[in-house]
Image (cartoon, coloured by chain):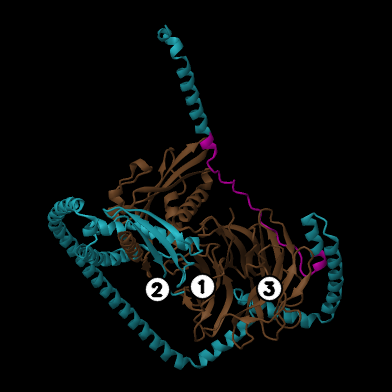
Amino acid sequence: MQQDRSPSESYFWPTILAVGLHLVIFAMLFVSFAMTPELPPSKPIVQATLYQLKSQSQATTQTNQKIAGEAKKTAAKQFETEQLEQRKVEQQKIAEAKAAEQKKAEAARKAEAQKAAEQKAAEAKKAEEAKKAEQRKQADIAKKKAEEAAKQKAAEEAKKKAAEEAARKKAAEEAKKKAAAEAAKKKAAEDAKKKAAAEAARKAAEDKKAQALAELLSDTTERQQALADTQGDQVAGSLDDLIISLVSQQWRRPPSARNGMSVEVTIQMLPDGTITNASVTRSSGDSAFDSSAVAAVRNVGRIPEMQELDRATFDRMYRQRRMIFKPEDLDL
Amino acid sequence: MKTLIRLALVGLTLLVGTVQAADPLVVTSGTDRATPIAVVPFGWQGGTVLPEDMADIVGNDLRNSGTFQPIPRQNMISLPTRASEIIYRDWKALGAQYVIVGNIQPAGGRLQVQFGVFNVTTEQQVMSGSVGGTPDQLRDMAHYVADQAFEKLTGIRGAFSTRLLYVTAERLGAGTRYTLQRSDYDGARAVTLLQSREPILSPRYSPDGRRIAYVSFEQKRPRIFVQHIDTGRREQITNFEGLNGAPAFSPDGNRLAFVLSKDGNPEIYVMSLGTRQLQRLTNHYAIDTEPFWGADGQTLYFTSDRAGKPQIYKQRLGGGAAERVTFVGNYNANPKLSADEKTLVMIHRQDGYTNFKVAAQDLQRGNLRILSDTSLDESPTVAPNGTMLIYATRQQGRGVLMLVSINGRVRLPLPTAQGEVREPSWSPYLN
């Protein structure tokens, strides 16, 4: 009579469980919400005030200490006392040679203020050079003209180059289109071929079963196998180039990239050409450089031309393939 | 037995064949074009119009890196705000490689942003995330989204939440008003840190981004100060005879390198900020200036004209001779290193007298690339992730700031206040 439990009894534990689970999920909602990062409140900024002093560095230091409102370390104090004494002597000196000193300071200040950005004494040299430049104005103008002409020429050349590039791109695109059309045609033909091949393969397999092991290893079979391999390799060779060119078009190198750096990425593909995975198998030591290579492969996405390949060659060469990224075209 | 040997041989041949077939494919060239990316306007569930366009800020950030090319909004066929609304076919037609969507929701006076990045080729989600903040933090949240997406897509840490220091000079009647400004890296949201009637020069961040050092002429002479950004508290660091200039914090933040001319001509010194102990680095009758620390905290790069013309040298703190680093061109100054110390950025003059350009030099091979298309360039400063740099130059007789991606793809002026703008300095990572 165990089956005849009352309905309320048989639903008791499931109900408890269900309610409990709901509570847990509800609680987790708040946990995840609480884990959202909150930006720290923007701090107000206090504008600093200038010291109300002319040249009394003693008072400067005192005010400074007041503002700071903290006792200096003994060492610092000692050093400061020493400095203060030194400054006193300096001030006396200054008073004695006040006129000359002021003149000098003023001149220095003016020069420095004018060239506020540089504040380099090297600037004096620049000025001299500029003077010289003026003296050679005539020559310079001629030079400038020549430069301008060169610039124009360069610009024109750049334009030409761009036009050429565009033409080349167009041509490449047309070629691609053509190739795609051809591929479609080929595919149709190949489909028929494949059917026949499949039939043949089935027959061959049956034959194989019937044949003895010795015959399987006979010269003729081996030669045929070799022949098939080379044909597959030829298609594969052009697919290598295709993969390299597609990945190159997606490869954007980080600023840390340098010619000669190298990262190995292993890619995994499905027979329809979909790249399912790309992962670093030998790092360059630079994570941004590694990521750029992985992203390049991922962003290619799918290479439909892989379908042209027979299955055996695909499995052998492309199901998993290593790629090495080693820039040679960077200018730094 | 013979059959067995033969079988083994065949097996071996097959194996060798497989190994040969698996010759790796070698890719030696890439593309110079930026990756097309679509940053779709973020959805907004609130009533009022938001003061900032987050998607626009994210798109500009990604563009500024020189790595991405945002797709113009008017070309977008659909405007999804969540994963389920993305029609990949539309984005394929536009040539987008990635799509970023986002949705903003009000949450009790605050805002909650959900975002996702999708790969159009693989039709897969690359990442998703969320961030919260107040309505006046929309720019911060946008830079956060850009940082996250950039790191996920490139493997490089994003630097869009960093800040910039620069100096402005404005003519006011008889005098000039100088201000020290801090803004977002893209020039937005400028805040004044200091105002003076006298020049302010060479602002530099400390490695923790909380203090800055600069040269102020407020006492009529160049003196070096350190200021705490949050409190405005400042401290005078130097008061030596003559020139006190070009401060630079050491990588540990405890020392300051600068230039003093107290002994006759400009030399480079290092001061320990705790003990105020002074150490002299260079000792040469030529001018030595513009120190920049190597990451080891022991090497200083600097400009010197000891060979007749300004060139860049490096020297170790412990002693040893200065080693010349630049050899191309008749003027190389203002050295800055990328964080990975692979690239030296500087002001470079190939020849002539006025053609000062920003250039990058590979430190291992020595080859050099001109990055700017302006002349009279000054003060280059590199983003902490090395993807962008900002420099000062002159346009129509006015000092302006230019942003350039290190790969040279992006060159654009930064929006800044009226008057002269100069002496930019990039902050370290602040988050």
* Structural crowding at the residue carrying mark 2, measured as other residues with C-alpha within 10 Å and reported as few (<14), some (14–19) or many (≥20): few
Q: The chain shown in cyan is which?
A: A
> Which residue in the structure is indicated by mark 1?
B393
Q: Which residue is mark 3?
A: B245
Label 2 to label 3: alpha-carbon separation: 41 Å
Q: Colour of chain B?
A: brown
- Residue B79, placed above or below residue B426: above
Q: Which mark is residue A329?
A: 2
Answer left or right for A3 relative to B301: left
Instruction: Please provide the residue range marked out in magenta.
Output: A31-59
Q: Is residue B295 left or right of residue A226?
A: right
Q: Give the main secondary structure, helix, strand or loop, of the magenta stretch.
A: loop
Q: Quadrant of residue B244?
A: bottom right
The chain that hosts pointer 1 is B
Q: Position of residue A188 (x, y in %)?
A: 13, 56
Residue A309 in sight here: no
Picture coordinates of residue B107 (x, y %)? 50, 36
